[in-house]
Amino acid sequence: GENVEQHPSTLSVQEGDSAVIKCTYSDSASNYFPWYKQELGKGPQLIIDIRSNVGEKKDQRIAVTLNKTAKHFSLHITETQPEDSAVYFCAASLNGQFYFGTGTSLTVIP
Amino acid sequence: EAEVAQSPRYKITEKSQAVAFWCDPISGHATLYWYRQILGQGPELLVQFQDESVVDDSQLPKDRFSAERLKGVDSTLKIQPAELGDSAMYLCASSLLWGGNTEAFFGQGTRLTVV
């Protein structure tokens, strides 16, 4: 199967600063990489994704980059706001299955 | 906006009792997943359906867990008998296609507490 590692496990930033979360994967056949935001007591919500034929994707304040050679991908959140506080999970899709990282708890300090 | 529906949201049960969770995926989604999420960890796949067929149940503890999707639409996950270690969030997700490279959407989950 696939092994996804995610760092850091916790991240605190001041409101307005940027936050970066990094993930690595082990199987070069993985071809789809979604990011999920999970608020307390709720299910994960898809916030952005990237496919293996793309190096970067941006949606307003969030962006994702993918380096297939190094097998790592990152989530970038700019101009952070208190409502960005949540747990973020990266995932890699291999053969129709999703393998998740262990999560990053992001706290945005007003 | 279409959503994955799950019920109940919360369930408290005594160990050795039976418990069941229900999931209704987004209309038209062929692939349905059941995940278990222990507090502080990422979701882990229990079982994956393509229409009514099981694609992968290698991580499903089959001595106590069962899952079905009889008509290829909604699905039920059952645990019998429940054990203390089964306390977790049980998440259902669905995607339009099978084979990866397509978005998967999660429901709100069922928080199970076994006492």
Image: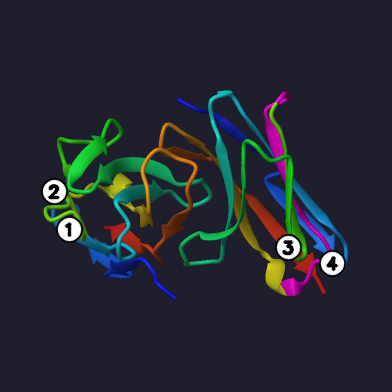
Work out whether residue B58 can be spotted.
Answer: yes
- Pinpoint the chain carrying mark 3: A
Q: Residues within 10 Å of mark 2 (few under 14, many from 20)?
A: some
Residue wearing tag 1 = B19
Question: CA gap, disc 2 to disc 3?
Answer: 39 Å
The circle drawn on residue B80 is 2
Name the front one of labels 1 and 4: 4
Q: Tell me if label 3 and label 1 are in contact, CB under 8 Å.
A: no
Question: What subunit carries mark 2?
Answer: B
Residue B70 horizontal side relative to residue B98, left or right: left
Residue type at tag 3: Thr
Task: Please determine whether, in this image, residue B92 is positioned above or below residue A79.
Answer: above
At a point 40% along the width and 72% down the height, the residue shown is: B2
Q: Dot 3: what SS?
A: strand
Q: Position of residue B56 (x, y in %)?
A: 28, 34
B50, A21: nearer the viewer: B50
Q: Amino acid at mark 4?
A: Glu
Q: CA distance from mark 3 to mark 1?
A: 35 Å
* Marks 1/4: CA–CA distance: 44 Å
Q: Amino acid at mark 1?
A: Val
What residue do we see at 42% from left, 59% from top?
B106
**Residue annotated with mark 3:** A107
Sequence-first tag of 3 and 4: 4
Per the image, the residue denoted by label 4 is A79
Which numbered mark, 3 or 4, is in the foreground of this view? 4
